[in-house]
Image (tube, helix red, strand yellow):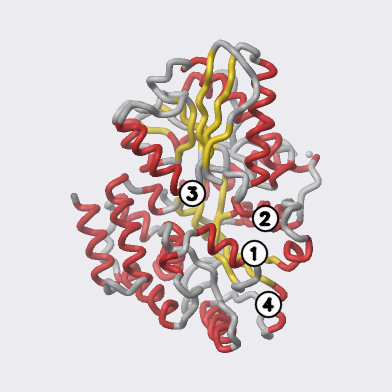
């Protein structure tokens, strides 16, 4: 995504908001009918309770409105979901409706004619429903293959109580950030929760170093081939990752921990910081299963500048998951109706019941929103750039190479130079 386009999208997002604001496993759904829509999503009750409950509510509402249709749910964790969707697509057994990511992630499924185009919904039931510029992230060669559900930016969440106990404040520069890491480590506190078994989590750290050191679109340009991964800024970004590893910045065993395990460590106050996207906002704002005392202790800060370089209003993020409809679905029209229905109700329920930022327009002025939620909207309003998650920008094969190399980089199995060279090789094919 170019900086100009990113800025346009961000301000279109906020303009639209302000304009209208003056455990793993399967779950059956209730209802009986002549037709069944299979719907697979990635919000298990254990780790994403509010999202999971909203899905159940939407399914119940849809079945009530459509008594001849039943929705059968299957729920998997993020990584299990990605693996299973890949397997199902090769055997033409995709669910009728499922979840997808934008850009490069979509390409093999669209090329293989696995996902149905959804332009008719955008021109029909969902016309003018989305924040301007967001559905385009799911567009390939003039057709749209996904209906976006969320918007996200990645920030560093931190435990204010732990920071205060160690005489620390939210850092604005990388020097201050390094001081926080060193102070916490010296005092026997794990500085950062990271579950790099999932690898995209480590990619967030690398992307921010690339953004700050490269001051702009250096990473996106390397991916879209208008630039190169041999750019010195991208080598330096890899060096900074390994410098953090050397400082014992991350919890022990981070390369073997899942993101869910890392999240649990942060939420159990076993680590002081946690870099994640704002899809986690509910855990720090509205999720009543999380103790209020902990929610009150959580703050966040934008990734700091590095050696005076970078813009703290430049973020890693973009559209989150969206819905696809399988091209070979036996109930394609019903599946499309359900997807459109889901998007509409998700936009209404996700803000108030889960505290997430939907891809559809919200009447912000009429809602009683948590302070942190309002702060995130303000950050979006002031964003100078949003760089789409690297693995989402990339084709499937390159994304796999990127994620594998991220784990090797954090594990110090490759040098920064080897890390960037491997990316250049993968992108050049």
Of badges 1 and 4, the one in the foreground is: 1
Q: How far apart are marks 1 and 3 (CA)?
A: 32 Å
Observer-nearest of 143 and 56: 56
The numbered dot on residue 162 is 4
Q: How crowded is mark 2: few (under 14 residues within 10 Å), some or many (20 or more)?
A: many
Assign a secondary structure to mark 1. helix
Which residue is found at the position 42% from the left and 65% from the top?
256
In contact (CB < 8 Å): disc 1 and disc 3: no
Of badges 3 and 2, the one in the foreground is: 2
Does residue 133 appear in this view?
A: no
Would you say 413 lies left or right of 202 here? left
Decide which of tag 4 and tag 3 comes sooner along the chain. 3
Q: How many numbered marks, from 0 up?
A: 4
Determine whether 420 is above or below 81 in the image.
Answer: below
Q: Distance between the residues labelled 1 and 4?
A: 12 Å
Assign a secondary structure to mark 2. helix
> Residue 424, position in %: x, y?
23, 59
Q: How far apart are marks 3 and 2 (CA)?
A: 28 Å
Tag 1 residue: 267
Decide which of tag 4 and tag 2 comes sooner along the chain. 4
> Residue 426, position in %: x, y?
23, 54
Of badges 2 and 1, the one in the foreground is: 1
Q: Residues within 10 Å of mark 3 (few under 14, many from 20)?
A: many
């Amino acid at each position: 995504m170019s900086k100009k386009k990113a800025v346009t999208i961000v301000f279109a997002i906020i303009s639209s908001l302000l304009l209208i604001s003056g455990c793993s496993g399967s779950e059956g759904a209730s209802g009986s009918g002549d037709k069944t829509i299979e719907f697979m999503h990635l919000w298990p009750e254990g780790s994403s309770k509010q999202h999971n409950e909203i899905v159940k509510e939407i399914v119940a509402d849809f079945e009530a409105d459509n008594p001849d249709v039943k929705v059968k749910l299957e729920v998997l964790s993020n990584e299990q979901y990605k693996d299973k969707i890949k397997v199902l697509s090769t055997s033409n057994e995709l669910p009728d409706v499922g979840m997808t990511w934008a850009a490069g992630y979509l390409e093999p499924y669209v090329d293989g004619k696995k996902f149905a185009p959804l332009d008719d919904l955008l021109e029909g039931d969902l016309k003018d429903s989305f924040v301007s510029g967001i559905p385009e992230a799911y567009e390939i060669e003039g057709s749209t293959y996904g209906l976006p559900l969320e918007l996200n930016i990645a920030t560093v969440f931190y435990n204010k109580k732990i920071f205060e106990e160690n005489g620390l404040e939210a850092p604005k520069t990388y020097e201050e950030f390094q001081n926080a890491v060193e102070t916490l480590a010296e005092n026997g506190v794990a500085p950062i929760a990271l579950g790099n078994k999932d690898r995209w989590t480590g990619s967030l750290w690398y992307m921010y170093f690339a953004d700050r050191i490269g001051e702009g679109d250096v990473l996106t340009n390397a991916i879209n081939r208008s630039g190169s991964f041999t750019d010195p800024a991208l080598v330096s970004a890899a060096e900074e990752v390994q410098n953090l590893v050397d400082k014992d910045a991350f919890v022990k065993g981070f390369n073997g921990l899942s993101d869910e395990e890392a999240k649990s460590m942060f939420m159990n106050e076993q680590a002081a910081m946690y870099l994640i996207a704002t899809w986690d906002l509910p855990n720090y704002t509205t999720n009543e299963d999380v103790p209020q005392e902990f929610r009150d202790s959580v703050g966040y800060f934008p990734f700091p500048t590095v050696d005076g370089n970078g813009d703290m209003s430049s973020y890693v993020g973009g559209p989150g998951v969206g819905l696809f409809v399988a091209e070979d679905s036996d109930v394609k029209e019903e599946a499309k109706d359900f997807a459109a229905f889901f998007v509409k109700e998700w936009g209404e329920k996700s803000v108030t019941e889960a505290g997430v930022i939907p891809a559809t327009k919200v009447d912000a002025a009429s809602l009683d929103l948590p302070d942190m939620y309002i702060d995130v909207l303000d950050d979006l309003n002031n964003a100078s750039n949003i760089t789409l998650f690297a693995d989402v920008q990339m084709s499937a094969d390159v994304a796999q190479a990127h994620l594998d190399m991220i784990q090797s980089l954090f594990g110090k199995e490759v040098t920064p130079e080897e890390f960037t060279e491997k990316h250049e090789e993968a992108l050049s094919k």
